[in-house]
Amino acid sequence: MALLEVKQLTKRFGGLVAVNQMNFEVAQGEIVGLIGPNGAGKTTVFNLISGILPATEGSIVLNNCELSRMPAHRRSLAGIGRTFQVVRPFEMTVLENVMVPALTRTKNTAKARKKAFQVLEMMGLDELAEAEPGNLTLAQRKRIEVARALATDPKLLLLDEVLAGLNPTEVAENLPLIRQVRDKGVTIIFIEHLMDAMMSVSERVLVMDQGSLISSGTPTEVTNDECVIKAYLGEEDPQC
Ligand SMILES: Nc1ncnc2c1ncn2[C@@H]1O[C@H](COP(=O)(O)OP(=O)(O)O)[C@@H](O)[C@H]1O
Ligand SMILES: [Mg+2]
């Protein structure tokens, strides 16, 4: 049975259809890549799943639980975790930044601190626990963003361009973390522009263009799909 089932998901902003009748499923334990040209609607899909924006139409079911009419904090409790494309850590230490989301799961500060440390260790950030995020590199701040999402123990983690803006060495260091998180039992959908990185870690890829899902399959299948190649080259094809 699928962990996540998305049916007929649609978002209109006035006359613009940012997400158009999307249907897809994600199985427990999968790493699914979500790609598409700029403005395709990828971040909007994450906003709809996490409840930052209400869907115009459609259903979002996680573990048999219908999320589409729940507010964002209830979806977080139901098991949705996400990162934001633009990272905005709080002006607190790295540890405190990760404790804040952990405190949505326990009122006990000592427990939240323990959870935050565990997650920081997993992300290789434990030595920076007392640092201020403002003094760290973008690569480190992106890791904090992932750590904050993990502190809520999500079942499904939505990663929005966590590798964007990093240099090749940093990408190579951060990439294995995605698999490591999945190996702890977290199902992952991730948006990424860096094709090589995306292809090396995704088991399945969904491709969006102009709000619609235009292809899905293994990395090799989608990169050989004519519709995908045309979408990236900006060509219209009536058969796609
Ligand atoms: N809150 C919003 N209000 C109005 N239009 C939006 C909003 N969010 C996104 N859009 C529009 O929806 C389309 C898809 O955007 P987005 O989901 O951010 O694309 P992607 O993440 O694939 O680059 C774009 O045309 C964008 O301008
Ligand atoms: Mg985006």
Image: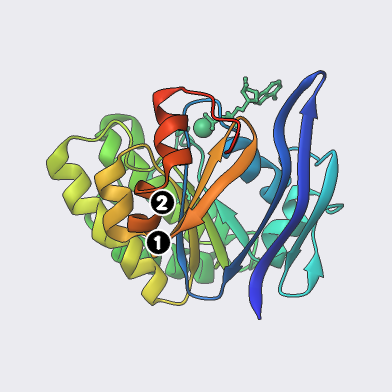
The relative height of residue 213 versus residue 188 in the rendered view (above or below) is above
Quadrant of res 61 = bottom right
Are the residues flagged by discs 1 and 2 in contact, CB closer than 8 Å? yes
| Disc assigned to residue 192 | none
- Depicted 68 relative to depicted 28: above or below: above
> What residue is rendered at 45% in x and 34% in y?
87
Q: Is residue 90 left or right of residue 78?
A: left
Quadrant where the C terminus is found in the figure? top right
Question: Callout 2, which amino acid?
Answer: Val
> Please, what secondary structure does the residue beneath circle 2 have?
helix
- Please state the horizontal and vertical placement of residue 64, each as a whole percent of the image: 78, 74
- Residue most extreme to the left: 169
Q: 10 Å neighbourhood of mark 1: few (<14), some, or many (≥20)? A: some
Q: Which residue is mark 1?
A: 218
Of the 4 image quadrants, the one containing the N terminus is bottom right
- Provide the secondary structure element on which disc 1 rests: loop
Q: Which residue is mark 2?
A: 222
Image-based side of 180 in relation to 91, left or right = left
Residue 187, image x, y percentages: 50, 68
At horizontal 64% and vertical 74% (from top left) the residue drawn is 2
Residue at 64% in and 39% down? 212
Across and down, in percent, residue 84 comes to 51, 39
Residue 58 coordinates in the image, percent (x, y): 83, 50
**Mark 2: few, some, or many residues within 10 Å (few <14, many ≥20)?**
many
Colouring style? rainbow
Split into quadrants, the picture shows ligand 1 in the one at: top right
Q: Is residue 218 left or right of residue 13?
A: left
Marks 1 and 2 sit apart, C-alpha to C-alpha, by 6 Å
Q: Amino acid at mark 1?
A: Thr
Residue, far bottom: 1
In the rendered structure, the answer to whether residue 166 lies left or right of residue 13 reads left
Inspect this view and state whether residue 125 appears: no
